Amino acid sequence: MSTSPRKSRSSGRVTLDDVALSAGVSRITASRALRGERSVGADLVTRVTLAANALGYVPDPAARALASARSHTVVVLVPLLSNNLFVDLLEAVHRVLHPLGYQILIGVTHYQPHEEEELLASYLAHRPAGLLVTGFDRTPRCQALIVQSGVPCVHLMETSRDPSVHCVGFSQADAGRAMTQHLLGTGRRRIAFAAAQLDPRVMQRLEGYRRSLKESGCHDAALEWLSPEPSSMALGAQLLESGMAAHPDVDAIFFCNDDLAQGGLLAALRLGIQVPQRLAIAGFNDLAGSDQMWPPLTTVRTPRVEIGESAAAMLLQLMRGESVEPSSVDVGWQLVLRQST
């Protein structure tokens, strides 16, 4: 087998033709072998792979996109990378798609509709094979870009009853309601909801909290402590301190995210507020470190790994032109009861 590369005169790159010549196969066979198509025998795949490795061949994604009218890139749009929830989700997507030859292109929207519009317009110009986007709350232009592109799309973190929409998630409102019911079940009646960022999923948790308290006759709008600032431990501490100063009769706080709740626990410790004897504290998402707080934090465990894996598998079916049933997958959630309540 010859391994002397005949590089492209214009770029100096080792080309697919070089790999095919070295392996003694046609260009189309080399291409199919490197894509892992089942029609190519295992012996040919081995031969072509060895030739490609020996020559140092690196596929040109732009050329591949032109040849197939679709790239092997999957675009994933998430709000933040500073939240471990989305990092865990991206890791799960990568584990499913990367071994199959797909490259993950990550876009961070920072919860800003105009940033999502710019990212979508830019990424769709590269003709990605598929899209994974967070939630349903986006501008009409974003929705039009997705629909008009014809690129298969799966929505993350939420579910829908629309059979034309493909999505994997869970009911944020039901999870918020369940946590509030748990706090009510421990005898708490003055339950505050402390939230940051105020994205659509946070507001759905708030709606679940409201519904539960209104049913029990305990709802007080003054105990909804809502901040548009980014979620952080420092902000959680501030929300607890200011909220308790204004409403000293509060006996439980449901934080919309674990980093807020972790900050709240530390603030309670500094202020000498006994948890859970005087004040119950609960969070959401079961982020890293919540089980190591003192006392360990009661929270809602959200299945971001399962969401990432299921959404990637659903997108694979759509990219292959296969029908997907059901189009909406609810992976559920879990109350994790620890000593903070």
Image (tube, grey):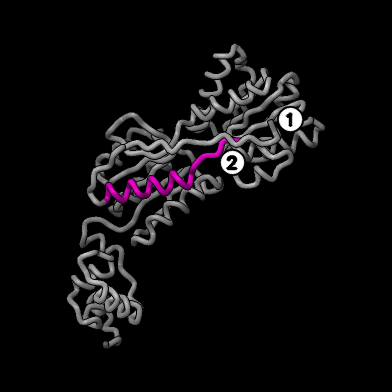
**Where does the image place residue 23, in percent across and percent down from the top left?**
24, 81
Which stretch did the figure color magenta?
299-319
Mark 2 → mark 1, Cα distance in angstroms: 18 Å
Q: Which quarter of the figure is the N terminus placed in?
A: bottom left
- Residue 29 in the image: above or below residue 233: below
| CB under 8 Å between discs 2 and 1 | no
Residue 303 appears in view: yes
Nearer the observer, 107 or 158: 158
Give me the residue at 63% from left, 34% from top. Answer: 337
Q: What kind of residue is marked 1?
A: Pro
56 part of magenta stretch = no
Rate crowding at label 1 as few (under 14), some (14 to 19) or many (20 or more) other CA atoms within 10 Å. Answer: some
Nearer the observer, 322 or 269: 322
**Where does the image place residue 107, in percent across and percent down from the top left?**
43, 49
Is 315 placed left or right of 214 in the picture? left
**Which residue is the site of mark 2?**
286
Residue 114 appears in view: no
Q: Which mark is residue 276?
A: 1
Nearer the observer, 214 or 221: 214
Is 289 placed left or right of 241 in the picture? left
- Main SS, magenta region, reads helix
**Where does the image place residue 216, in percent across and percent down from the top left?**
58, 14
Give me the residue at 29% from left, 37% from top. Answer: 144
Question: Helix or strand or loop: what does disc 1 sit on?
Answer: loop
- Residue 37 in the image: above or below residue 90: below
Give me the residue at 61% from left, 47% from top. Answer: 288
First of labels 2, 1 by sequence position: 1
- Residue 31 in the image: above or below residue 268: below
Task: Count numbered badges in the picture.
Answer: 2
Is 56 placed left or right of 180 in the picture? left
